[in-house]
């Protein structure tokens, strides 16, 4: 697999998440071009069962900043985009047509969620092609109930991801990735031995540890969470702990019920 790179693939492969931004606004024609890339994305059944909330008002951004675990980039970047699985429009249309409802279930939610993620990534690539930077925010899921309330999401609409977007005020290093051998299976999934797993994650383990060690509060975190290695770091209470996963899983299932995704 040695495809010749073109301008688009070079751009995609030079992606870095940007977490420091200039205050400069994104020109409205540029933003419209980016939104149109989201809209042209593939979408299940051409139903476009997703939506995006644009937040640029400083007060609203400040509110989202608090909900998203005070990630500074929200205050710096001129806009925050929250992408939602949105069966609301489709379900209303089906209702108006007095047709049988088909989208009031887990498959309906997933269909909208996949559409939303595909549109988000098209917009991320479009933004980067305009010289903008982006960073996704996992805190969208962690606080999905509060974010839904802040954005006044109606029934059958739930947030699945968000990103900040703006002109970069940093040039981050490219982060490590596992390569083709870790990600691509030919014809059927090849299972891994323990040694395979160790070697697949070797570079990531080293890069994660080096990055972690460079932080000012490294010693403090190591002591506080008893971290011995990269995997300890990934699952410690300060990162992706079991407690976080349990709380968010329960809250999100409850949110799907509250928003009547399954009714
Ligand atoms: C769904 C998703 C959620 C993410 N959430 C956050 C986040 O809350 N805060 C953050 O700083 N970066 C977040 N990121 C960015 C990842 O940390 C980043 O993509 C990863 O470390 C690889 O770095 P790179 O994008 O610079 O290559 C998120 C990325 C994804 C895809």
Image: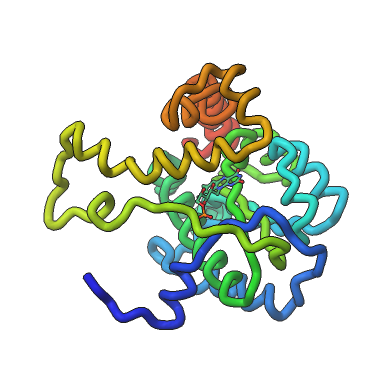
Left/right placement of residue 141 relative to residue 100 reads right
Q: Quadrant of residue 171?
A: bottom right
- Asked whether, in this view, residue 130 is left or right of residue 77, the answer is left
Which of these two is toward me, 133 or 221?
Answer: 221
Along the viewing direction, whichever of 215 and 77 lies nearer the viewer: 215
Residue ID at (60%, 40%): 214
188 displayed left or right of 215: left
In this view, the residue in front, 102 or 192, is 192
Q: Quadrant of the N terminus?
A: bottom left
The residue sitting at 73% across, 63% down in the picture is 169
Which residue does the image show at 52% across and 69% down from the upper left?
125
Q: Relative to residue 185, is residue 233 depicted above or below?
A: above
Instruction: Reply above or below: 57 against 139.
Output: below
Tag count = 0
Q: Is residue 249 visible?
A: no
Image coordinates for residue 203, horizontal then vertical, percent:
36, 45
Q: Position of residue 150 (x, y in %)?
A: 75, 41
Looking at the image, which is closer to me, 231 or 78? 231
Q: Position of residue 168 (x, y in %)?
A: 69, 65
Q: Residue at x 71, y 80 (%)?
A: 29
Colouring scheme applied when the structure was drawn: rainbow
């Amino acid at each position: 697999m040695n495809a010749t790179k073109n301008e688009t693939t070079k751009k995609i492969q030079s992606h870095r998440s940007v977490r420091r931004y200039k205050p400069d606004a994104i020109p409205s024609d540029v933003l419209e071009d980016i939104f149109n890339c989201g809209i042209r994305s593939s979408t299940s059944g051409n139903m476009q069962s997703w939506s995006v909330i644009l937040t640029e008002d400083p007060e609203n951004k400040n509110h989202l900043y608090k909900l998203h675990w005070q990630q500074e980039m929200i205050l710096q970047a001129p806009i925050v985009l929250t992408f939602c699985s949105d069966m609301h429009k489709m379900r209303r249309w089906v209702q108006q047509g007095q047709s049988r409802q088909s989208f009031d279930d887990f498959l309906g939610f997933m269909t909208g969620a996949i559409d939303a993620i595909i549109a988000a990534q098209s917009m991320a690539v479009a933004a980067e092609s305009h010289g903008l930077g982006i960073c996704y925010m996992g805190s969208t899921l962690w606080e999905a109930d509060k974010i839904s309330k802040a954005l006044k999401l109606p029934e059958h609409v739930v947030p699945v991801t968000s990103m900040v977007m703006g002109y970069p005020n940093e040039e981050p290093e490219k982060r490590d990735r596992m390569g083709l051998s870790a990600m691509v299976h030919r014809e059927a999934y090849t299972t891994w031995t323990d040694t395979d797993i160790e070697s697949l994650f070797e570079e990531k383990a080293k890069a994660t540890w080096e990055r972690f060690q460079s932080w000012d509060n490294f010693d403090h975190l190591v002591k506080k969470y008893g971290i011995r290695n990269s995997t300890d770091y990934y699952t410690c209470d300060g990162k992706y702990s079991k407690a976080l996963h349990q709380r968010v899983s329960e809250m999100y299932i409850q949110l799907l019920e509250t928003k009547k995704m399954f009714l």
